[in-house]
Amino acid sequence: MGVLYSVIRFENLHELKRLCHWGPIIALGVIAICSTMAMIDSVLWYWPLHTTGGSVNFIMLINWTVMILYNYFNAMFVGPGYVPLKWKPEKAQDTTYLQFCKVCQAYKAPRSHHCRKCNRCVMKMDHHCPWINNCCGFQNHASFTLFLLLAPLGCIHAAFIFVMTMYTQLYNRISFGWNTVKIDMSAAKRDPLPIIPFGLSAFAASLFALGLAVGTTIAVGMLFFIQMKVILRNKTSIESWIEEKAKDRIQFYQTAEIFVFPYDMGSRWQNFKQVFTWSGVPEGDGLEWPIREGCHPYSLTIEQLKQKADKRVRSVRYKVIDAYSGACCPLNKGIKTFFTTPCTEEPRISLKKGELILVTRGLRHWMYGDKILDYLATEDGSRIRGWFPRKCVEKFHCDAETDQASEGEKKNR
Ligand SMILES: [Zn+2]
Ligand SMILES: [Zn+2]
């Protein structure tokens, strides 16, 4: 069933272009190096055709590779699932609880977010993962997490093989004198000679593959635990952030609201079953979500709307006083700006003197905000936002009109 599912989706041949990106190229490279080296080393260390142990070892290796690649490609090509273009909720009055995405010309379904890389609204978006060059969300959450589990398991097996091969090969070549240890890499003492000669380059290659395998186990293993936390709490990384901001907002305005996250069903098993099913297809349609008893069906999106309004009130206008090219590490904006460039894939925006920017957050030497564009330019929904050096702007003192506007927004809350 699962296989058929992904094969049908393979009709979308244009999806193959997802492979042309540094993420999948590196990820598939690591998988190829580790599994090929593990198979070559297995032949040397534990010849698969003579003993049951050797056969099991080899079959297990092939099994890891197939399962890792299957889940990896499923996560990449099945994708997270997108909110249909021009989507609106069944009941017209529900639109008041939802944000509107100008790019997709659709309401943002609960739990969906617009991904700038995919350029679509993604169902239950967790994050855009560069390693699969796709978003992790509603439809591929299970296969993505399985990949994160299987890759470290396969790597641990491979690392064990690398260590055992290097150990046995060294052992065969090592000779102990009274006070000397000699390693002769040119000849093995073992009889019969191995099928593949294990020279210095093979030793170096095994050591390199061991490094890759250990590194992958640690890095990917950590990601697995993060994703399991997300699944068991039924709360994506983005939603954790929204919840945090909700607490912050309630504390700031001292309102007596209590924000309860609505999608956590209260039991880890229930949350788990929503993502992992026997058919491989997650429960539900990705647009409507079961909620906890006593919660409003749109309580999260309502909170998002409140935060959006709040952001507008709390953001500050800045005016550009010095042009900026949009370079990641600009050379002419001082050494501190150069070295403290934000470590994120978020874009930088070029600035022209006199432009206005609505700043929403900032670091010591960098700021993040939206360019305030002409009314006509914003009609199509495009926004220009990103990082720029703090040096290039100064605070713009609002006139009385805009002050009143933000006051009004505050009272409306
Ligand atoms: Zn969108
Ligand atoms: Zn994406």
Image: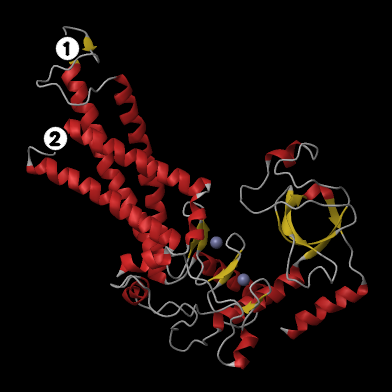
Judged left or right of residue 222, residue 393 is right
Precedes in sequence: disc 2 or disc 1: 2
How many numbered circles are shown?
Answer: 2
Question: Residue shown at 59%/84% (left/top)?
Answer: 88
Q: CA distance from mark 2 to mark 1?
A: 27 Å
Q: Nearer the viewer, residue 373 or 313?
A: 373
Q: Which mark is residue 176?
A: 1
Check disc 1: other Cα within 10 Å, few if <14, some if 14-19, many if 20+. few
Relative to residue 224, is residue 383 depicted above or below? below
Q: Quadrant of ligand 1?
A: bottom right
Q: Position of residue 316 (x, y in %)?
A: 79, 64
Q: Position of residue 222 (x, y in %)?
A: 40, 52
Identify the residue at the far left of this view: 51
Is residue 214 visible in this depiction of the protein? no
Relative to residue 350, is residue 274 depicted above or below? below
Identify the residue at the far top of this view: 178
Judged left or right of residue 6, residue 88 is right
Q: Nearer the viewer, residue 154 or 87?
A: 87
Q: Quadrant of residue 171?
A: top left
Q: Position of residue 355 (x, y in %)?
A: 87, 58
Identify the image quadrant of the N terminus: bottom left
Check disc 2: other Cα within 10 Å, few if <14, some if 14-19, many if 20+. some
Q: Which mark is residue 47?
A: 2
**Colour setting:** secondary structure
Amino acid type of the residue tagged 1 in the rendering: Phe
Is residue 90 visible in this depiction of the protein? yes
Judged left or right of residue 111, residue 285 is left
Q: Nearer the viewer, residue 296 or 100?
A: 100
Relative to residue 1, is residue 387 depicted above or below? above
Marks 2/1 in contact by CB < 8 Å: the verdict is no
